[in-house]
Image: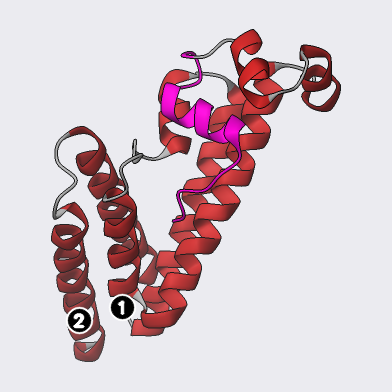
């Protein structure tokens, strides 16, 4: 993913939802509080808009990677993201962990549903015996690798998850052929 992003997204992502106040955010964005409130209603409204846009961008980005070379490409793309100097984990899940409100939980669920749909589609294309189960297993690898990269060590997290994903995909394809 590109490291270029509008300043408000960058500040919210790097500092966390509760790590920056409205006054500082407005100053850094170069807008008045009145402008922020006119367009977003509240800081939560801005957060929700940023999270929705981020979820759409990330899901589209991964879908493009998957379409190009399927499953391996997803994990290769994730490793490139993990290697970025500003990588701080999944902004959507970080927000859900920090901001326990229904709107953020709903955005997070839709975000994960988007990943699940993408990964289940890869499982269907690969001819897996149980695409929904494989899709969910792959989702666990994506999110697990992202958490490990953010909180333990980014180096090799995507590659390790890639190998595990390819092993699961191979086993699922063999199972499908045996049925």
Looking at the rendering, in which quadrant would you find the N terminus? bottom left
Residue 23 location, quadrant: top right
Can you give x and y, in whole percent of width and height, for residue 30 in the image?
Answer: 70, 23
Which residue is more in the foreground, 24 or 130?
24
Q: Which residues are magenta?
A: 1-19
Residue plotted at (26% across, 57% down): 79
Q: Is residue 101 left or right of residue 38?
A: left
Residue plotted at (33% across, 72% down): 73
Label pair 2/1, CB-CB below 8 angstroms: yes
Residue plotted at (63% across, 45% down): 53
Disc 1 target residue: 129
Q: Is residue 101 left or right of residue 45?
A: left
| Magenta-colored stretch includes residue 2 | yes
| Magenta-colored stretch includes residue 7 | yes
Give the tally of numbered discs. 2
Looking at the rendering, in which quadrant would you find the C terminus? bottom left
Residue 136 location, quadrant: bottom left
Can you give x and y, in whole percent of width and height, for residue 168 in the image?
Answer: 19, 69
Q: Mark on residue 1?
A: none
Disc 2 target residue: 175
Secondary-structure class at tag 2: helix
Answer yes or no: is residue 106 visible. Answer: no
Can you give x and y, in whole percent of width and height, for residue 98 in the image?
Answer: 44, 19
């Amino acid at each position: 993913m590109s490291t270029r992003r509008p300043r408000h997204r960058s500040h919210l992502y790097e500092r966390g939802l509760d790590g920056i106040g409205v006054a500082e955010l407005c100053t850094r964005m170069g807008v008045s509080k009145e402008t922020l409130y006119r367009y977003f209603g509240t800081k939560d409204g801005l957060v929700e808009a940023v999270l929705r846009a981020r979820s759409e961008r990330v899901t589209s980005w991964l879908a493009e990677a998957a379409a190009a070379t399927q499953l391996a490409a997803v994990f290769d793309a994730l490793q490139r993201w993990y290697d970025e100097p500003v990588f701080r984990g999944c902004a959507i899940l970080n927000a859900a962990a920090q901001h326990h409100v229904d709107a953020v939980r709903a955005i997070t669920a839709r975000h994960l549903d988007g990943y699940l749909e993408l990964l289940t589609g890869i499982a269907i294309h690969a001819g897996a015996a149980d695409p929904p189960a494989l899709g969910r297993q792959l989702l666990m690898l994506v999110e697990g690798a992202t958490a490990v990269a953010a909180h333990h060590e980014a180096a090799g997290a995507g590659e390790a998850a890639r190998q595990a994903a390819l092993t699961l995909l191979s086993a699922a394809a063999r199972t499908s052929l045996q049925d």
